[in-house]
Image (cartoon, rainbow, N blue to C red):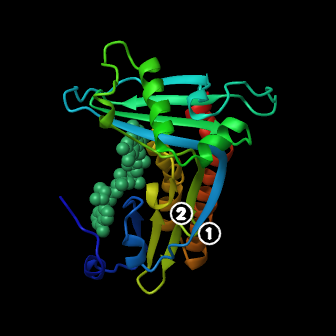
Amino acid sequence: MDLLFTEDYLRRIPGPDWPRIIVVADGSCGESCSVLGISSDYIVESCNAYGANATIERLDQRQVPTPEIKAHSLYFDLSAYGMDAVREPRNSAVKPGFHLKIYGTFRNRYMALACPASDSKMVRFLRHTANSAIMKNIFHQSFNAYKTDIEPRLNDLTLHHMQCSRRLFEIMLSHRRVNAAYIEGDNVAVTIEGEAARVLNFDTGCGVNLGLRGLEALGTFIYKTATALDQNDVFEALSAKIQHSKQVAETFRQTGLASTMFE
Ligand SMILES: Cc1cc2nc3c(=O)[nH]c(=O)nc-3n(C[C@H](O)[C@H](O)[C@H](O)COP(=O)(O)OP(=O)(O)OC[C@H]3O[C@@H](n4cnc5c(N)ncnc54)[C@H](O)[C@@H]3O)c2cc1C
């Protein structure tokens, strides 16, 4: 059944004595939280990495899911753009080079390119360049170098099927300051999940996994709320849920990109 969550729908829910629970998972553009009066205040934090994304749509290719392809320690020859190809001294604290991931289907190819934050010459150049042809060329060459053998190469004639970030950007995680709340008059507990709770400005290809991390605390939250003897018990359940969500965001910031991109 298709159900649109609106203020009107909320009014029509009958109000029993025990707390009801609304799980909001309406994605990064959803507005259900504002209908429920929950603040849209986000904490935005750096993941200490830079990245760029690309998509290739080729309607003549089959919509068949493909195993993800990962490549590490990539360097790009940007001498044609006036950046000399001399490698910088390898700093042991910063893993050198870029990490690439290709995923999706043969028809809709997605690419993610990322590197740990550094102040290297190459990174600075790609972050601040105003020439979008450079990123396009990097994704073009990387795709042809790492694609599966059975899919066609991109060439000058098919390159327009690719869209990509104009430059390297800082990867940021935005997470909602309040992701669980209690509406006292209505005796409703609300929890916010998925991209409505936390979202990256970079597509790792693993967005669903990040959403699932939040759900790990949902069972306990429902149990604690359903068995609450008074409001204090409900507040404890809310507080544990908010705490868990903070932890999910912090863990992602510390190790998320390493596990989805760098390893
Ligand atoms: C191009 C692209 C490729 C991706 N590829 C992958 C991948 O390969 N693997 C991966 O893990 N992740 C991938 N992701 C990320 C993944 O799609 C998201 O992380 C995931 O869909 C987020 O799930 P969500 O349930 O939070 O939100 P959404 O999937 O956005 O779902 C929100 C739902 O709520 C509904 N809704 C909104 N408002 C209301 C309302 N008022 N009432 C009722 N319903 C409402 C919307 O219609 C929608 O169905 C990709 C993302 C993009 C953009």
Query: From what the image shows, is residue 191 above or below residue 205?
Result: below
- Badge 2 element: helix
The reply, left or right, for residue 41 in relation to residue 121 is left
Picture residue at 65% right of the left edge, 53% below the top:
46
Q: Quadrant of the N terminus?
A: bottom left
Tag 1 secondary structure? helix
- Comparing 136 with 45, the one in front is 136
Q: Disc number at residue 236?
A: 1
Q: Residues within 10 Å of mark 2 (few under 14, many from 20)?
A: some
Amino acid type at image mark 1: Glu
- Outermost residue to the top: 149
124 lies left or right of 260 = right
Q: Residue at x 37, y 71 (%)?
A: 32
The nearer-to-camera label among 2 and 1 is 1
Residue 224's mark? 2
Q: Of marks 2 and 1, which one's residue comes earlier in the chain?
A: 2
Task: State the image coordinates of residue 68 (x, y, percent, origin top left).
Answer: 44, 26
How packed mark 1 is, by other alpha carbons closer than 10 Å (few <14, some 14-19, many 20 or more), is some
Q: Residue at x 80, y 26 (%)?
A: 89
